[in-house]
Amino acid sequence: MNGKDLARTTLSAGLAPLSHLYNRLRPGIRILMYHRVADLPAYDQLTVSPRRFEEHMAWLAAHQRVISLDTAVTELDSGQPLRPGVVITFDDGYLDNLTHALPVLERHRLPASIFVTTAFAEQAMSHPRYPAVEGRLHLTWEEIRQMAANPLITIGSHTLTHPFLGRLSGEESAREIAQSRAVIQEKIAAPVNYFCYPSGDYGARETGLVSDAGYRAAVTVSPGSNRAGTPRFALRRTEVTDRDSPRELAKKLAGGFDLIHLLLDLRRRRNFARAARLAQEKGN
Ligand SMILES: [Zn+2]
């Protein structure tokens, strides 16, 4: 463990009781963020092994109220006192979501949302994080259709080309957001109501564009629980990794990592804002 990791761990351990207490007093809905479910030779922050995924799902099925994103948004909008709940999401539309995650979700009867990028589905490009992957990385349209037909699965949009939206012109950003919805709706012949910002890069311009495009809600990578007052186009998510045992997962759901994740997110958002400013200056 390097100094930075040590500081992070110590800080999060110190802050855990505080965020834990806050979450107990104000229950909310947690949206979990997964990407890949695969056995990789080395640790990857965005990949959980099939064994770990099975462990997570078995624990969630036994201990939590797992609901679809649709149900979550309806409950958030209802004005009724919230019951704690958990939503499962996957980003980027990986083939392993079908081969490794879906059988586990079906076995435990757990709903999940998958956010697909149209250029990935076309196999025209793949996520830049995994350039050297053997075989096919992403779901095809046929497979996405197959998953969309499963009552447990909701398909959402993750743009056309997975850009950093903040670095695009307003026109390009609007196209990524609205056009992807139109394309996916046509491909799966069903409404697409949810959007996910690539790399969590979004600002006031993007939340407005997502609303204008007709989506019902959007998810970010900003951490924390969702409550009635959480902006509908900036829902929070909790990242889960292969290092999380069910015990760690329980701690995350209880808000034990929220404050430390919030500090990391503030830094990320600051960097996004700086990159967006530089891109705008270059563009003008
Ligand atoms: Zn992504």
Image (spheres, helix red, strand yellow):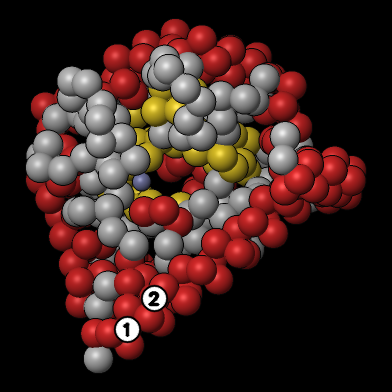
User: Real-space Cα distance between discs 2 and 1?
Assistant: 6 Å
Relative to the observer, which residue lies in front, 163 or 89? 163
The residue sitting at 38% across, 81% down in the picture is: 278
Residue placed furthest toward the bottom: 284
**Mark 2–mark 1 contact, CB under 8 Å?**
yes
Numbered mark located on residue 276 in the image: 2
Question: In the rendered image, which quarter is residue 125 located in?
Answer: top left
Disc 2 residue type (three-letter): Ala
Residue placed furthest toward the front: 2
Mark 1 lies on residue: 280
Task: Tell me: residue 168, above or below residue 84.
Answer: below
Left or right for 215, reference 26: left
Task: Tell me: residue 108, above or below residue 169.
Answer: above
Whether disc 1's CB lies below 8 Å from ligand 1 is answered: no
Disc 1 residue type (three-letter): Gln
Q: Position of residue 162 (x, y in %)?
A: 27, 53
Instruction: State which quarter of the image contains the N terminus.
Output: top right
* SS state under label 2: helix
Relative to the observer, which residue lies in front, 16 or 43? 43
Instruction: State which quarter of the image contains the C terminus.
Output: bottom left
* SS state under label 1: helix
Left or right for 167, reference 145: right
Q: Position of residue 222 (x, y in %)?
A: 57, 55
